[in-house]
Image (spheres, rainbow, N blue to C red):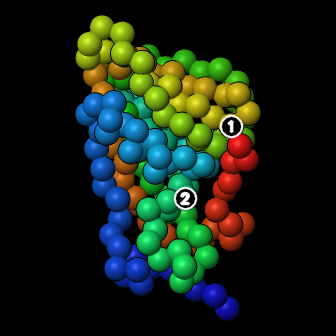
Amino acid sequence: MSMDAKFEDGGESPLNLGALDADDLKIISSLTQDAVFPASEMKWDKRAGRFALLLNRMRWEDNGSERHAPERVQSVLMFNTVQSVASQGVPKGDADTVLSLLHIGFEQTDAPSGHIILTLAGDGAIRLTVEALDVTLKDVTRPYTAPSKKRPSHPD
């Protein structure tokens, strides 16, 4: 029987990162590339101006990948100062649909306001209109072996 890896095995710590500008957001985007999540794990709290996702993200930063199979970890990706949310190509009412996050980008409108665009596999997208960039990525579980035992790849 195989055991899931632990943070202590690789001497690594869970991520807890913030992004307050477009350069910071690029780092979070690279760390969440190929994260998967059921549509039921998206939540917009309109009153608080917060949009959050519970992701199963690939641990791209894992330095121990030579010692063990690729790992995923559950993470909360939270966007603050959200004024509105719109989506395209995201099935409505089907909470069991699994979505895959490919990229997070920012389009500035009237500084510091703008649109955060979450690009999903299969031509889906979620657009968040924000007053300013305020994004947090936090690992909330221990890593586990990726079910496929492979890292996602994107042919050129």
Say above or below: 152 vs 46. Answer: below
81 sits left or right of 104 in the view:
left
Residue 47 visible in image = no
- The kind of secondary structure element at disc 1 is loop
Which residue is pictured at 68% across the width and 66% down the height? 150
1 sits left or right of 131 in the view:
right
Q: Position of residue 66 (x, y in %)?
A: 54, 79
- The kind of secondary structure element at disc 2 is strand
In space, the residues marked 1 and 2 are separated at their CA atoms by: 15 Å
| Mark 2, residue position | 58
Of 90 and 31, which appears nearest the observer? 31
Q: Do residues under tags 1 and 2 come within 8 Å of each other at their CB atoms? A: no
Q: How crowded is mark 2: few (under 14 residues within 10 Å), some or many (20 or more)?
A: many
Q: Which of marks 1 and 2 is nearer the N terminus?
A: 2
| Mark 1, residue position | 121
Which residue is pictured at 37% across the width and 37% down the height? 25
Quadrant assignment, res 10: bottom left
Q: Which amino acid does label 2 sit on?
A: Met
Q: What residue type is labelled 1?
A: Ala
Question: Quick one: quadrant of the N terminus?
Answer: bottom right
Which dot marks residue 27? none
Q: Position of residue 61 (x, y in %)?
A: 44, 62
Say above or below: 89 vs 134. Answer: above
Q: Where is residue 129 in the image (x, y as percent from the top left)?
A: 41, 17
